[in-house]
Image (spheres, helix red, strand yellow):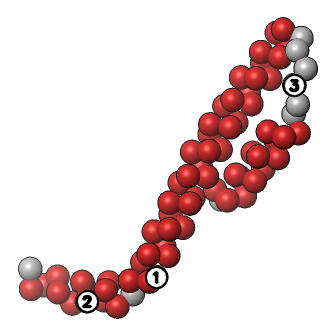
Amino acid sequence: MKELRPFLRQLLRRRYQLLLGTLLLLVTLAMGIGLLGLSGWFITATALAGLTGAALDIFTPSAGIRFLHWGAR
C-alpha cells in the first residue's frame, strides 16, 4: 500500500480535472446510448411507414441524430 500513496496524492491534487473528465465521459456515454436508441427507432419507423404508407416526419429525428452525433464524437 505504501507504493500507491504517491500516486493517490497526485490523483487527489487533480480531483477537479478528474471530476471534469468523469463528467465528460458520462455525457459522451449518455449521448452514445441516445444516438443508438434514436437512430434505431428512426430506422424502424421509416420501415413501418414504408410498409404501411403512413406519413413520417423525417426532419425532427434527423436533427436529433445530428445533435447526438456531435456530442458522441
Task: Return the mark for residue 17.
Answer: 1
Q: Are marks 3 and 2 in contact (CB under 8 Å)?
A: no
Q: Which residue is mark 3?
A: 56
| Residue at the image position 84 percent from the left and 40 percent from the top | 60
Image x and y of residue 3, in percent: 13, 84
Label 3 or label 2, whichever lies nearer to me, is: 3
As drawn, 13 above or below 20: below
Tag 3: amino acid: Leu
| Residue at the image position 31 percent from the left and 86 percent from the top | 12
Task: Return the mark for residue 8.
Answer: none
Of label 1 and label 2, which has the lower sequence position? 2
What is the quadrant of the C terminus in the image?
A: bottom right
Label 1 or label 3, whichever lies nearer to me, is: 3
Q: Residues within 10 Å of mark 1 (few under 14, many from 20)?
A: few
Marks 3 and 2 sit apart, C-alpha to C-alpha, by 56 Å
Query: In which image quadrant can residue 44 be found?
Result: top right
Of label 3 and label 2, which has the lower sequence position? 2
Secondary element at tag 3 = loop
Image x and y of residue 37, in percent: 62, 37
Q: Is residue 37 left or right of residue 60?
A: left
Image x and y of residue 51, in percent: 82, 9
Q: Is residue 18 left or right of residue 48?
A: left
Q: Residue furthest top?
A: 52
Q: Which residue is mark 2?
A: 9
Marks 1 and 3 sit apart, C-alpha to C-alpha, by 44 Å
